[in-house]
Amino acid sequence: MAESLIKIAGQAERLVRVIGHVAAWSAVLLVLLVAGNVLGRYLLGLSSVAAQELEWHVMAFGALFGMAYGINQGAEVRVDVLYERFGPRTRLLVDLLGTIGLLIVSLALAWFATRYVMQSYAMNEGSPDPGGLTRRYLLKGLLPIAFLLLAIQAAGMTLVNIARLVAPADLRPE
């Protein structure tokens, strides 16, 4: 049973890694956009509200999809005041409760964000600034997708923690 859970979790984590790599490369696009906007404004006297707003859109993409990837890579911030003093089984239980909590919160946020996106779509929301980007609901549409990706990562981690709890001590996956 533990092996099956680990395989399923591995597939979820691979999906998160692939999307995380795309999100990481969006940082290069962001740098190019900012540099292009600065150079265009100061060297050529050209300025575009849409190009400036695009910077925020690319940054939002990287941040939203970087959440799940950061957790996938173990880059989350953790305060281990008590955790380091716990035994291995208690640590596993704490990890399991934490990943279940993350899964529930991620799914709830995806659910609530979907209504937010639908409202934006219904009113065909765009930039309030002249020359800004239209179809703001496309950017907002990243919210539920990113939180679903975070939920997939949390589900994978939950499965790993369950596998570690149910497997005999000498066969526990690491």
Image: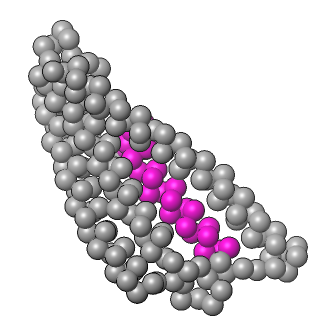
**Residue 118 image-quadrant placement:** bottom left
Q: Position of residue 2 (x, y in %)?
A: 18, 21
In magenta segment, residue 68: yes
Report the residue that reaches farthest toward the right.
44
Q: Is residue 35 left or right of residue 100?
A: right
Which residue occupies the foreground of this view, 83 or 49? 49
In which quadrant is the N terminus drawn?
top left
Residue 5 visible in the current orientation: yes
Q: Is residue 100 above or below residue 126?
A: above
Q: Is residue 86 above or below residue 59?
A: above
Residue 83 in percent (x, y) is at: 21, 35
The quarter of the picture where residue 98 lies is top left
Q: How many marks?
A: 0
Q: Is residue 144 left or right of residue 29?
A: left
**Residue 69 is covered by the magenta coloring:** yes
Q: Is residue 86 visible?
A: no
Instruction: Give the residue at x 61% y 53%.
Output: 27
Residue lying at 29% horizontally and 25% vertically, measured from the top left:
7
- Where residue 11 appears, as percent x and y from the top left, is 35, 32
**Is 4 drawn above or below residue 14 in the view shown?**
above
Q: Residue shown at 72%/58% (left/top)?
A: 32
- Which stretch did the figure color magenta? 51-76
Horizontally, residue 34 falls left or right of residue 79, namely: right
Q: Nearer the viewer, residue 78 or 164?
A: 164
Q: Tell me the residue at 43%/63% (across/down).
A: 142
The way the protein has been coloured in the rendering is one colour
Per the picture, the main secondary structure of the magenta-coloured stretch is helix
Q: Residue furthest top?
A: 170
x and y percent of residue 133 in the render? 59, 79
Where, quadrant-wise, is the C terminus in this rendering?
Answer: top left
